[in-house]
Amino acid sequence: MNKVSKWFIFTLVAIAQFMVVLDTAITNVALPTIKQQLHFTDSTLQWVVTAYVLTFGGFLLLGGRAADLFGRRRTLLTGMIAFTTFSFLIGISQSVPMLIVLRALQGMSAALMSPAALSIVLTTFRDGPERNRALGYWTLVATGGAAIGLLLGGALTQYVGWRWNFFINVPVGIIMATAISRYVPAHAREEKYTSLDLRGAVLVTASLISLVFAFSQASSWGWLSAPILGIFAASAALMTGFIFNESRAEHPLMPLSIFKIRNVSGANLMMAPIYAAMLGNFFIITLYMQTILHYSPVRTGLAFLPFPIILGFMSTRIPKLVGRYGFKRFLVAGPLLVAIAMAWLSRLPVDGSYLSSLLPAVILIPVGMGMTFMPIIAAATSGVPGHEAGLASGLISTSQQMGGALGLSILSGVAATVTASSAHLGPTGALVHGFDRAMLVAMLFLLFAVGLAITVIRQPRRPKKPQDANHKLHVALES
Protein backbone atom coordinates (compact mmCIF):
# COMPACT_ATOMS: atom_id res chain seq x y z
CA MET A 1 0.00 0.00 0.00
CA ASN A 2 1.66 3.25 -1.05
CA LYS A 3 1.68 6.48 0.91
CA VAL A 4 -0.99 8.19 -1.19
CA SER A 5 -3.45 5.34 -0.78
CA LYS A 6 -2.85 5.25 2.97
CA TRP A 7 -3.78 8.89 3.37
CA PHE A 8 -6.77 8.51 1.06
CA ILE A 9 -8.04 5.68 3.26
CA PHE A 10 -7.36 7.85 6.30
CA THR A 11 -9.43 10.66 4.79
CA LEU A 12 -12.41 8.38 4.22
CA VAL A 13 -12.47 6.89 7.70
CA ALA A 14 -11.73 10.30 9.26
CA ILE A 15 -14.85 11.73 7.61
CA ALA A 16 -16.82 8.83 9.10
CA GLN A 17 -15.41 9.69 12.53
CA PHE A 18 -16.17 13.36 11.95
CA MET A 19 -19.86 12.50 11.43
CA VAL A 20 -19.90 10.64 14.74
CA VAL A 21 -18.23 13.44 16.73
CA LEU A 22 -20.23 16.16 14.99
CA ASP A 23 -23.50 14.69 16.24
CA THR A 24 -22.23 14.75 19.81
CA ALA A 25 -22.11 18.55 19.76
CA ILE A 26 -24.19 19.81 16.84
CA THR A 27 -27.43 19.72 18.83
CA ASN A 28 -26.10 21.83 21.73
CA VAL A 29 -26.76 25.13 20.01
CA ALA A 30 -30.18 23.90 18.84
CA LEU A 31 -31.37 22.82 22.31
CA PRO A 32 -33.38 25.97 23.13
CA THR A 33 -35.15 25.74 19.75
CA ILE A 34 -35.82 22.00 20.12
CA LYS A 35 -37.13 22.63 23.65
CA GLN A 36 -39.58 25.21 22.37
CA GLN A 37 -40.83 23.34 19.30
CA LEU A 38 -41.15 19.85 20.79
CA HIS A 39 -42.08 21.03 24.32
CA PHE A 40 -39.19 19.50 26.26
CA THR A 41 -38.94 20.23 29.99
CA ASP A 42 -35.74 21.46 31.63
CA SER A 43 -35.13 18.00 33.13
CA THR A 44 -35.57 16.10 29.85
CA LEU A 45 -33.70 18.51 27.55
CA GLN A 46 -30.23 17.18 28.38
CA TRP A 47 -31.35 13.74 27.13
CA VAL A 48 -31.17 15.01 23.54
CA VAL A 49 -27.40 14.92 24.06
CA THR A 50 -27.17 12.30 26.82
CA ALA A 51 -29.20 9.60 25.00
CA TYR A 52 -26.75 9.72 22.09
CA VAL A 53 -23.56 9.85 24.16
CA LEU A 54 -24.82 7.20 26.56
CA THR A 55 -25.56 4.47 24.01
CA PHE A 56 -22.51 5.51 22.00
CA GLY A 57 -20.27 4.93 25.00
CA GLY A 58 -22.20 1.95 26.32
CA PHE A 59 -21.87 -0.10 23.13
CA LEU A 60 -18.33 0.93 22.07
CA LEU A 61 -16.68 -2.15 23.56
CA LEU A 62 -19.13 -4.31 21.62
CA GLY A 63 -18.43 -2.29 18.46
CA GLY A 64 -14.68 -2.57 18.90
CA ARG A 65 -14.85 -6.30 19.41
CA ALA A 66 -17.20 -6.69 16.44
CA ALA A 67 -14.58 -4.97 14.27
CA ASP A 68 -11.99 -7.56 15.34
CA LEU A 69 -14.34 -10.50 14.87
CA PHE A 70 -16.26 -9.65 11.71
CA GLY A 71 -13.90 -7.29 9.87
CA ARG A 72 -13.33 -3.57 10.27
CA ARG A 73 -14.78 -2.38 6.97
CA ARG A 74 -17.92 -4.47 7.33
CA THR A 75 -18.52 -3.16 10.85
CA LEU A 76 -17.87 0.44 9.78
CA LEU A 77 -20.29 0.18 6.84
CA THR A 78 -23.00 -1.46 8.95
CA GLY A 79 -22.77 1.33 11.49
CA MET A 80 -22.71 4.06 8.84
CA ILE A 81 -25.83 2.80 7.05
CA ALA A 82 -27.72 2.60 10.34
CA PHE A 83 -26.40 6.01 11.44
CA THR A 84 -27.59 7.62 8.20
CA THR A 85 -31.03 6.00 8.48
CA PHE A 86 -31.58 7.10 12.08
CA SER A 87 -30.37 10.63 11.26
CA PHE A 88 -33.16 10.94 8.71
CA LEU A 89 -35.76 9.58 11.16
CA ILE A 90 -34.62 12.03 13.87
CA GLY A 91 -35.07 14.85 11.37
CA ILE A 92 -38.73 13.97 10.91
CA SER A 93 -39.48 13.11 14.56
CA GLN A 94 -42.52 14.81 16.10
CA SER A 95 -42.38 14.03 19.83
CA VAL A 96 -40.04 14.00 22.82
CA PRO A 97 -39.98 10.18 23.28
CA MET A 98 -39.46 9.58 19.56
CA LEU A 99 -36.50 11.98 19.40
CA ILE A 100 -34.81 10.55 22.50
CA VAL A 101 -35.24 6.91 21.40
CA LEU A 102 -33.91 7.64 17.91
CA ARG A 103 -30.95 9.54 19.34
CA ALA A 104 -30.16 6.46 21.44
CA LEU A 105 -30.31 4.24 18.34
CA GLN A 106 -28.12 6.72 16.46
CA GLY A 107 -25.58 6.46 19.30
CA MET A 108 -25.57 2.66 19.01
CA SER A 109 -24.80 3.00 15.31
CA ALA A 110 -21.95 5.38 16.08
CA ALA A 111 -20.56 2.77 18.47
CA LEU A 112 -20.02 0.46 15.49
CA MET A 113 -18.42 3.20 13.37
CA SER A 114 -15.92 4.84 15.72
CA PRO A 115 -13.73 1.92 16.93
CA ALA A 116 -13.78 0.32 13.47
CA ALA A 117 -12.57 3.58 11.91
CA LEU A 118 -9.77 4.09 14.46
CA SER A 119 -8.63 0.47 14.24
CA ILE A 120 -8.36 0.88 10.43
CA VAL A 121 -6.02 3.81 11.08
CA LEU A 122 -3.97 1.83 13.61
CA THR A 123 -3.49 -1.10 11.24
CA THR A 124 -2.86 1.13 8.20
CA PHE A 125 -0.01 3.12 9.77
CA ARG A 126 2.93 1.51 11.52
CA ASP A 127 3.84 2.46 15.08
CA GLY A 128 6.21 5.44 14.91
CA PRO A 129 6.36 8.92 13.33
CA GLU A 130 3.88 8.07 10.55
CA ARG A 131 1.27 6.81 13.00
CA ASN A 132 1.91 9.80 15.29
CA ARG A 133 1.19 12.10 12.36
CA ALA A 134 -1.99 10.20 11.53
CA LEU A 135 -3.11 10.32 15.18
CA GLY A 136 -2.42 14.06 15.21
CA TYR A 137 -4.88 14.55 12.37
CA TRP A 138 -7.26 12.09 14.05
CA THR A 139 -7.14 14.28 17.16
CA LEU A 140 -8.14 17.27 15.05
CA VAL A 141 -11.14 15.34 13.72
CA ALA A 142 -12.11 13.86 17.10
CA THR A 143 -11.96 17.10 19.08
CA GLY A 144 -12.35 19.77 16.40
CA GLY A 145 -15.52 18.07 15.18
CA ALA A 146 -17.23 19.00 18.43
CA ALA A 147 -16.33 22.69 18.05
CA ILE A 148 -17.24 22.77 14.36
CA GLY A 149 -20.52 21.10 15.32
CA LEU A 150 -21.37 24.10 17.49
CA LEU A 151 -20.65 26.49 14.62
CA LEU A 152 -22.50 24.44 12.00
CA GLY A 153 -25.37 23.71 14.36
CA GLY A 154 -25.86 27.41 14.98
CA ALA A 155 -26.01 28.25 11.28
CA LEU A 156 -28.34 25.37 10.39
CA THR A 157 -30.66 26.03 13.32
CA GLN A 158 -31.04 29.73 12.60
CA TYR A 159 -31.30 29.65 8.82
CA VAL A 160 -32.92 26.32 7.82
CA GLY A 161 -34.18 24.79 11.08
CA TRP A 162 -32.87 22.42 13.74
CA ARG A 163 -33.94 19.33 11.79
CA TRP A 164 -31.17 19.97 9.27
CA ASN A 165 -28.64 19.21 11.99
CA PHE A 166 -29.63 15.61 11.26
CA PHE A 167 -30.71 15.74 7.62
CA ILE A 168 -27.18 16.85 6.68
CA ASN A 169 -25.90 13.38 7.62
CA VAL A 170 -28.00 11.69 4.94
CA PRO A 171 -26.20 12.74 1.71
CA VAL A 172 -22.80 12.62 3.43
CA GLY A 173 -23.52 9.13 4.78
CA ILE A 174 -24.61 7.79 1.39
CA ILE A 175 -21.54 9.22 -0.39
CA MET A 176 -19.10 8.02 2.26
CA ALA A 177 -20.60 4.52 2.53
CA THR A 178 -20.21 4.15 -1.24
CA ALA A 179 -16.61 5.41 -1.20
CA ILE A 180 -15.58 3.26 1.78
CA SER A 181 -17.06 0.11 0.25
CA ARG A 182 -15.10 0.81 -2.94
CA TYR A 183 -11.72 2.07 -1.73
CA VAL A 184 -11.11 0.82 1.82
CA PRO A 185 -9.70 -2.75 1.80
CA ALA A 186 -11.88 -5.46 3.23
CA HIS A 187 -9.94 -6.33 6.38
CA ALA A 188 -9.86 -9.95 7.33
CA ARG A 189 -11.10 -10.99 10.74
CA GLU A 190 -8.44 -10.74 13.43
CA GLU A 191 -9.84 -13.71 15.34
CA LYS A 192 -10.69 -17.23 14.20
CA TYR A 193 -13.89 -17.36 16.23
CA THR A 194 -16.94 -15.16 15.57
CA SER A 195 -18.90 -15.45 18.81
CA LEU A 196 -19.52 -12.18 20.63
CA ASP A 197 -19.61 -12.07 24.40
CA LEU A 198 -23.22 -10.90 24.55
CA ARG A 199 -23.52 -11.54 28.28
CA GLY A 200 -20.55 -9.27 28.92
CA ALA A 201 -21.95 -6.66 26.53
CA VAL A 202 -25.31 -6.60 28.34
CA LEU A 203 -23.68 -6.37 31.79
CA VAL A 204 -21.25 -3.55 30.99
CA THR A 205 -23.77 -1.55 28.97
CA ALA A 206 -26.45 -1.86 31.66
CA SER A 207 -23.92 -0.83 34.31
CA LEU A 208 -22.79 2.27 32.44
CA ILE A 209 -26.32 3.33 31.49
CA SER A 210 -27.47 2.92 35.10
CA LEU A 211 -24.57 5.03 36.34
CA VAL A 212 -25.26 7.90 33.94
CA PHE A 213 -29.00 7.74 34.63
CA ALA A 214 -28.37 8.01 38.38
CA PHE A 215 -26.19 11.09 37.95
CA SER A 216 -28.66 12.68 35.55
CA GLN A 217 -31.60 12.27 37.95
CA ALA A 218 -29.79 12.95 41.23
CA SER A 219 -30.43 16.69 41.17
CA SER A 220 -34.22 16.22 40.94
CA TRP A 221 -34.62 13.05 43.03
CA GLY A 222 -32.01 13.92 45.67
CA TRP A 223 -28.39 12.75 45.75
CA LEU A 224 -28.97 10.58 48.84
CA SER A 225 -32.52 9.44 48.00
CA ALA A 226 -33.29 5.72 48.12
CA PRO A 227 -33.91 5.38 44.34
CA ILE A 228 -30.61 7.08 43.44
CA LEU A 229 -28.61 5.03 45.95
CA GLY A 230 -30.33 1.90 44.67
CA ILE A 231 -29.41 2.67 41.07
CA PHE A 232 -25.79 3.35 42.06
CA ALA A 233 -25.72 -0.01 43.89
CA ALA A 234 -27.22 -1.77 40.86
CA SER A 235 -24.61 -0.19 38.58
CA ALA A 236 -21.80 -1.38 40.86
CA ALA A 237 -23.28 -4.91 41.01
CA LEU A 238 -23.58 -5.08 37.22
CA MET A 239 -19.98 -3.93 36.77
CA THR A 240 -18.82 -6.54 39.28
CA GLY A 241 -20.72 -9.16 37.30
CA PHE A 242 -19.10 -7.93 34.08
CA ILE A 243 -15.58 -8.23 35.51
CA PHE A 244 -16.36 -11.72 36.84
CA ASN A 245 -17.79 -12.74 33.46
CA GLU A 246 -14.74 -11.45 31.60
CA SER A 247 -12.40 -13.43 33.85
CA ARG A 248 -14.31 -16.65 33.09
CA ALA A 249 -15.54 -16.24 29.49
CA GLU A 250 -13.79 -18.29 26.80
CA HIS A 251 -13.89 -15.35 24.36
CA PRO A 252 -14.42 -12.25 26.54
CA LEU A 253 -15.69 -8.94 25.21
CA MET A 254 -12.80 -7.20 26.97
CA PRO A 255 -9.84 -9.46 27.81
CA LEU A 256 -8.69 -8.14 31.18
CA SER A 257 -5.10 -8.83 30.21
CA ILE A 258 -5.08 -5.63 28.16
CA PHE A 259 -4.98 -3.67 31.42
CA LYS A 260 -1.61 -5.22 32.23
CA ILE A 261 -0.24 -2.66 29.76
CA ARG A 262 0.23 0.20 32.23
CA ASN A 263 -0.21 3.05 29.77
CA VAL A 264 -3.42 1.55 28.40
CA SER A 265 -4.89 1.64 31.90
CA GLY A 266 -3.54 5.11 32.66
CA ALA A 267 -4.65 6.66 29.38
CA ASN A 268 -8.18 5.31 29.72
CA LEU A 269 -8.43 6.52 33.32
CA MET A 270 -7.32 9.97 32.12
CA MET A 271 -9.60 10.19 29.11
CA ALA A 272 -12.84 9.90 31.10
CA PRO A 273 -12.43 13.00 33.32
CA ILE A 274 -10.85 15.04 30.50
CA TYR A 275 -13.75 14.49 28.12
CA ALA A 276 -16.22 14.84 31.00
CA ALA A 277 -14.94 18.37 31.54
CA MET A 278 -14.88 19.15 27.81
CA LEU A 279 -18.40 18.00 26.88
CA GLY A 280 -19.93 19.44 30.04
CA ASN A 281 -18.17 22.73 29.31
CA PHE A 282 -19.62 22.94 25.79
CA PHE A 283 -23.13 22.28 27.14
CA ILE A 284 -22.99 24.84 29.95
CA ILE A 285 -21.19 27.59 28.04
CA THR A 286 -23.70 27.25 25.21
CA LEU A 287 -26.55 27.73 27.69
CA TYR A 288 -24.72 30.70 29.25
CA MET A 289 -24.36 32.40 25.87
CA GLN A 290 -27.97 31.92 24.86
CA THR A 291 -29.81 32.34 28.18
CA ILE A 292 -27.61 34.94 29.92
CA LEU A 293 -25.88 36.83 27.09
CA HIS A 294 -28.90 36.31 24.76
CA TYR A 295 -26.81 35.21 21.77
CA SER A 296 -28.52 33.90 18.65
CA PRO A 297 -27.65 30.33 17.53
CA VAL A 298 -25.31 31.67 14.82
CA ARG A 299 -23.56 34.07 17.15
CA THR A 300 -23.15 31.26 19.67
CA GLY A 301 -21.51 29.07 17.04
CA LEU A 302 -19.23 31.90 15.90
CA ALA A 303 -18.14 32.44 19.50
CA PHE A 304 -16.51 28.99 19.38
CA LEU A 305 -14.70 29.69 16.09
CA PRO A 306 -11.23 30.15 17.68
CA PHE A 307 -11.48 26.59 19.02
CA PRO A 308 -11.11 24.58 15.76
CA ILE A 309 -8.58 27.08 14.37
CA ILE A 310 -6.26 26.84 17.37
CA LEU A 311 -6.85 23.11 17.72
CA GLY A 312 -5.99 22.57 14.06
CA PHE A 313 -2.69 24.42 14.52
CA MET A 314 -1.81 22.45 17.66
CA SER A 315 -2.77 19.09 16.16
CA THR A 316 -0.29 19.53 13.29
CA ARG A 317 2.56 20.47 15.63
CA ILE A 318 2.18 18.06 18.54
CA PRO A 319 2.98 14.75 16.72
CA LYS A 320 6.54 15.88 15.91
CA LEU A 321 7.05 17.12 19.45
CA VAL A 322 5.74 13.84 20.86
CA GLY A 323 8.16 11.98 18.59
CA ARG A 324 11.01 14.06 20.01
CA TYR A 325 10.08 14.38 23.68
CA GLY A 326 7.57 11.56 24.32
CA PHE A 327 3.94 11.87 25.35
CA LYS A 328 4.09 12.08 29.16
CA ARG A 329 5.03 15.74 29.56
CA PHE A 330 2.19 16.75 27.23
CA LEU A 331 -0.28 14.63 29.21
CA VAL A 332 0.68 16.68 32.27
CA ALA A 333 0.80 20.15 30.70
CA GLY A 334 -2.27 19.86 28.44
CA PRO A 335 -4.94 19.04 31.05
CA LEU A 336 -3.33 21.56 33.42
CA LEU A 337 -3.89 24.36 30.89
CA VAL A 338 -7.52 23.32 30.44
CA ALA A 339 -7.94 23.25 34.24
CA ILE A 340 -6.76 26.88 34.35
CA ALA A 341 -9.37 27.73 31.70
CA MET A 342 -12.09 26.03 33.77
CA ALA A 343 -11.01 28.03 36.82
CA TRP A 344 -11.48 31.20 34.73
CA LEU A 345 -14.96 30.04 33.64
CA SER A 346 -15.92 29.41 37.27
CA ARG A 347 -16.09 33.20 37.67
CA LEU A 348 -18.72 33.88 35.01
CA PRO A 349 -20.69 37.04 35.92
CA VAL A 350 -24.33 37.84 35.29
CA ASP A 351 -23.34 40.87 33.23
CA GLY A 352 -20.41 39.19 31.45
CA SER A 353 -19.06 39.86 27.99
CA TYR A 354 -17.49 37.57 25.42
CA LEU A 355 -14.10 39.30 25.37
CA SER A 356 -13.51 39.35 29.11
CA SER A 357 -15.55 36.39 30.38
CA LEU A 358 -15.25 33.74 27.65
CA LEU A 359 -12.55 34.45 25.06
CA PRO A 360 -9.50 33.72 27.30
CA ALA A 361 -10.90 30.23 28.03
CA VAL A 362 -11.98 29.67 24.41
CA ILE A 363 -8.34 30.28 23.43
CA LEU A 364 -6.70 28.31 26.24
CA ILE A 365 -8.90 25.17 26.08
CA PRO A 366 -7.94 24.15 22.49
CA VAL A 367 -4.26 24.76 23.27
CA GLY A 368 -4.50 22.32 26.18
CA MET A 369 -6.70 19.85 24.31
CA GLY A 370 -4.39 19.94 21.31
CA MET A 371 -1.53 18.99 23.62
CA THR A 372 -3.57 16.18 25.18
CA PHE A 373 -5.61 14.12 22.72
CA MET A 374 -3.00 12.84 20.29
CA PRO A 375 -0.62 11.82 23.15
CA ILE A 376 -3.43 10.13 25.08
CA ILE A 377 -4.52 8.06 22.06
CA ALA A 378 -0.86 7.18 21.39
CA ALA A 379 -0.46 6.04 25.00
CA ALA A 380 -3.71 4.04 24.89
CA THR A 381 -2.86 2.15 21.68
CA SER A 382 0.92 1.76 21.61
CA GLY A 383 2.18 -1.74 22.29
CA VAL A 384 -1.26 -3.31 21.68
CA PRO A 385 -1.14 -6.42 19.44
CA GLY A 386 -2.96 -6.27 16.08
CA HIS A 387 -5.66 -8.74 17.07
CA GLU A 388 -6.70 -6.37 19.87
CA ALA A 389 -6.54 -3.12 17.85
CA GLY A 390 -10.33 -2.89 17.69
CA LEU A 391 -10.57 -3.58 21.42
CA ALA A 392 -8.02 -0.86 22.27
CA SER A 393 -9.82 1.57 19.94
CA GLY A 394 -13.18 0.73 21.47
CA LEU A 395 -11.77 0.99 24.99
CA ILE A 396 -10.32 4.50 24.65
CA SER A 397 -13.44 5.63 22.79
CA THR A 398 -15.58 4.13 25.56
CA SER A 399 -13.62 6.04 28.18
CA GLN A 400 -14.08 9.20 26.12
CA GLN A 401 -17.82 8.89 25.49
CA MET A 402 -18.80 7.51 28.89
CA GLY A 403 -16.68 10.20 30.49
CA GLY A 404 -18.61 12.70 28.38
CA ALA A 405 -21.98 11.22 29.35
CA LEU A 406 -21.07 11.14 33.04
CA GLY A 407 -19.55 14.61 32.87
CA LEU A 408 -22.61 16.08 31.22
CA SER A 409 -24.88 14.44 33.81
CA ILE A 410 -22.70 15.41 36.78
CA LEU A 411 -22.04 19.01 35.71
CA SER A 412 -25.64 19.71 34.70
CA GLY A 413 -26.75 18.07 37.96
CA VAL A 414 -24.39 20.23 40.00
CA ALA A 415 -25.56 23.33 38.14
CA ALA A 416 -29.23 22.45 38.72
CA THR A 417 -28.70 21.66 42.42
CA VAL A 418 -26.78 24.88 43.11
CA THR A 419 -29.29 26.93 41.12
CA ALA A 420 -32.20 25.50 43.12
CA SER A 421 -30.48 26.35 46.42
CA SER A 422 -29.54 29.90 45.35
CA ALA A 423 -32.99 31.41 44.88
CA HIS A 424 -31.97 34.41 47.00
CA LEU A 425 -29.72 35.53 44.10
CA GLY A 426 -32.68 35.90 41.75
CA PRO A 427 -33.44 33.67 38.72
CA THR A 428 -30.53 34.89 36.58
CA GLY A 429 -28.04 35.12 39.43
CA ALA A 430 -28.93 31.61 40.66
CA LEU A 431 -28.53 30.17 37.18
CA VAL A 432 -25.09 31.73 36.70
CA HIS A 433 -24.02 30.64 40.19
CA GLY A 434 -24.91 27.07 39.22
CA PHE A 435 -22.86 27.37 36.02
CA ASP A 436 -19.88 28.66 38.01
CA ARG A 437 -19.94 25.78 40.49
CA ALA A 438 -20.20 23.26 37.65
CA MET A 439 -17.04 24.73 36.10
CA LEU A 440 -15.22 24.28 39.42
CA VAL A 441 -16.14 20.58 39.35
CA ALA A 442 -14.85 20.39 35.77
CA MET A 443 -11.58 21.89 36.98
CA LEU A 444 -11.31 19.13 39.62
CA PHE A 445 -11.85 16.50 36.90
CA LEU A 446 -8.86 17.87 35.00
CA LEU A 447 -6.61 18.12 38.05
CA PHE A 448 -7.39 14.45 38.73
CA ALA A 449 -6.26 13.65 35.18
CA VAL A 450 -3.03 15.60 35.75
CA GLY A 451 -2.39 13.50 38.86
CA LEU A 452 -2.87 10.30 36.85
CA ALA A 453 -0.45 11.52 34.17
CA ILE A 454 2.21 12.18 36.79
CA THR A 455 1.80 8.95 38.76
CA VAL A 456 0.61 6.30 36.29
CA ILE A 457 1.76 7.13 32.75
CA ARG A 458 5.25 5.89 31.87
CA GLN A 459 7.23 7.13 28.90
CA PRO A 460 8.53 4.09 26.94
CA ARG A 461 12.25 4.08 26.33
CA ARG A 462 13.01 4.77 22.72
CA PRO A 463 15.29 2.21 21.08
CA LYS A 464 18.77 3.52 20.43
CA LYS A 465 19.49 4.39 16.86
CA PRO A 466 21.92 2.02 15.16
CA GLN A 467 24.32 4.85 14.36
CA ASP A 468 24.38 5.84 18.04
CA ALA A 469 25.29 2.30 19.07
CA ASN A 470 27.99 2.07 16.38
CA HIS A 471 29.43 5.39 17.47
CA LYS A 472 29.68 4.25 21.10
CA LEU A 473 31.30 0.99 20.00
CA HIS A 474 33.81 2.91 17.90
CA VAL A 475 34.70 5.19 20.84
CA ALA A 476 35.09 2.20 23.15
CA LEU A 477 37.45 0.45 20.72
CA GLU A 478 39.56 3.59 20.33
CA SER A 479 39.90 3.94 24.05
Image: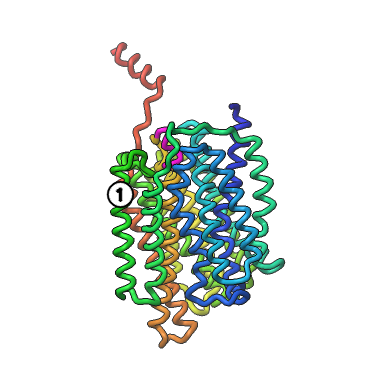
Residue 71 is left or right of residue 442, and the answer is right
Q: Residues within 10 Å of mark 1 (few under 14, many from 20)?
A: some
> Is residue 320 something one can see in this rendering?
no
- Residue 17: x and y in percent read 56, 48
Q: Tell which of 355 and 173 is nearer to you.
A: 173
Q: Position of residue 438 (x, y in %)?
A: 41, 70
Query: Where's the C terminus, which quadrant?
Result: top left
Label 1 belongs to which residue?
243
Give the side of residue 448 with respect to residue 152, left or right.
left
Quadrant for the N terminus, please: top right
- Asked whether 113 falls inside the magenta stretch, the response is no
Front residue of this view, candidates 313 and 240:
240
Query: For this rendering, which residue is in front, 441 or 200?
Result: 200
Q: Which residues are magenta?
A: 385-392
Q: Quadrant of residue 253?
A: top left
Q: Going 48% across and 31% down the picture, which residue do you hit?
A: 126
- Give the main secondary structure, helix, strand or loop, of the magenta stretch: helix
